[in-house]
Amino acid sequence: MTLRTQLCRTNGPAQTAGDAMTTPGPQVRDDMAVDVALSVLTSARIPHLVVCDADGRCTGLVTRDQLAAIPSTPWDTDDTRLRDIVHDRGPFTPVLMPRHDAEDAMQGRKLGASPVIDEDGYALGVLVLPHP
């Protein structure tokens, strides 16, 4: 039985970040150009992308607002890679972290979403704070 299967079988209200996470959605490499990443976000109609390194480990989360703030001159966005811009680079939320602790940490860092990672650093999902 996998860790994800074990988490899905819990009864009652969500207690860990893994219980409360949503699917990670599209994951992109950190060497992707900013303009391409913005196109992915726009076409998929999603608020954020999980950014991964060449090995597939989570290196961050980037939002549409962060990408839209990058200067839009063609020579800048063609050459600017996701790893070169400021975005949430962690610490990320461990899958077994208590949900309330994860949400408190996110609020303290003013994050609306955080990647939920396994013990090896791979994104399993995204924890999104509920809107008030």
Image (cartoon, helix red, strand yellow):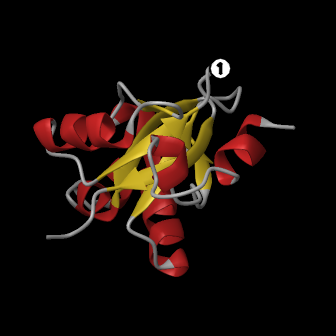
| Residue 117 visible in rendering | yes
Image quadrant assignment for residue 93:
top left
Nearer to me, 88 or 101 = 101
Q: In this view, does 82 lie above or below 14?
A: above
User: Taking 103 as reference, is 40 left or right?
Assistant: right
Is the C terminus in the top left, top right, bottom left or bottom right quadrant? bottom left
Residue 65: % across, % down: 24, 62
Give the x, y percent position of residue 24.
Answer: 57, 55
Q: Looking at this view, is 121 or 80 the one in front?
A: 121
Residue 30 shows up from this direction: no
Tell me the residue at 45%/72% (across/down): 46
Q: Mark 1 points at which residue?
A: 120
Image quadrant in which the N terminus is located: top right
The residue lying at 37 percent from left, 33 percent from top is 84
Amino acid bearing label 1 = Asp
- Judge the density around disc 1: few (<14), some (14-19), many (≥20) Cα neighbours within 10 Å: few
Question: Residue 82 location, x and y as percent?
Answer: 43, 41
Q: Where is residue 44 in the image (x, y as percent from the top left)?
A: 54, 76
Residue occupying image coordinates x 81% and y 37%: 2
* 6 lies left or right of 28: right
- Using the image as rendered, state which of residue 80 and residue 110 is in the foreground: 110
Q: Which residue corresponds to the image point at 37% horizontal and 42% vertical from the top-left?
A: 99
